Amino acid sequence: MNLILFGPPAAGKGTQAKRLVEEHGYVQLSTGDMLRAARASGSELGNRVAKIMDEGGLVSDEIVIDLIDEQLETHKNAPGFIYDGFPRTVGQAKALDKLLESRGTQVDRVIRLVVDETQLMQRVTKRFEEEGRKDDNPATFAARLDKYNQDTAPLLPFYAERGILREVDGMASIEEVTKGVEEALKQTA
Ligand code: AMP
């Protein structure tokens, strides 16, 4: 299973991905988590991406594609992968297709968590207070949302054309969203 959890920042992708990991043993591939780990380790890569992340921009396609490739190699025998925060551009989506094709698999399902921008702002304000993630401050978050609308939302028709896109109401309770995601996973393409 190759499942893309799709949606703007703070839509609940990470929360749902963790539940799917517990339920199905899938491997969560969050490029945001990988980049934050690189920064925390003080690696050359971490230093290279720090400024872009703090400004709410997107790091280069090449960097995140390499990270995903590495993880697919590391977890060769995993029963499935959940892509969380990747792909974020058409270039990344095409590269993912190639990476999977070379391994004899494909993107099976794209689940979009639908949350309106007012609620996203409320969630991220709370997360900023609780976790202090620099890029959750209101100005940077607005830049991240702009990036999502400009560069990432165009992926929706890309996947819709293949008949593998499903939508789930991301404003319901965490439990309800999980139910919706599980339903969407069961449906055949
Ligand atoms: P996230 O936790 O997914 O919101 O990611 C945090 C930040 O990491 C983003 O605002 C980007 O700067 C960077 N990032 C994460 N994933 C990607 C990606 N697939 N492409 C480009 N930049 C990314």
Image (tube, rainbow, N blue to C red):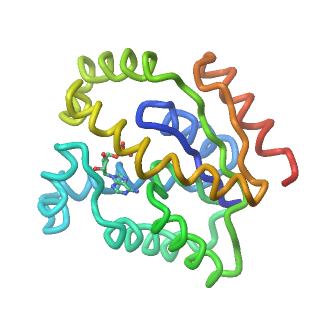
Say above or below: 58 vs 137.
below
Q: Is residue 120 left or right of residue 103?
A: left
What is the number of callouts on the image?
0
Residue 155 rendering spot, x and y as whole percentages: 56, 54
Q: Nearer the viewer, residue 21 or 10?
A: 10
Q: Would residue 164 be found to the left or right of residue 43 on screen?
A: right
Question: The N terminus lies in which quarter of the figure?
Answer: bottom right
Q: Nearer the viewer, residue 56 or 43?
A: 56
**Which image quarter holds the C terminus?**
bottom right
Residue in view at x 39 percent, y 19 percent = 123
Closer to the camera in the image, 93 or 70: 93
Q: In the visual, does 3 lie left or right of 187?
A: left
Image point 23% across, 58% down: which residue? 38
Indicate the quadrant where residue 173 lies: top right
Check the image and report above or below for 102 versus 128.
below
Going 18% across and 54% down the picture, which residue do you hit? 39
x then y, percent, for residue 16: 57, 35
- Residue furthest to the bottom in view is 102
Looking at the image, is 117 positioned above or below residue 32?
above
Identified at 22% across, 34% down, the residue is: 140
Q: Which of 116 and 13 lies nearest the eye of the viewer?
A: 116
Residue 131, quarter of picture: top left
User: Residue 116 placed where, x, y %?
Assistant: 51, 22
The answer to which image quadrant residue 111 occupies is top right
Rendering coords of residue 138 (x, y %)? 23, 24
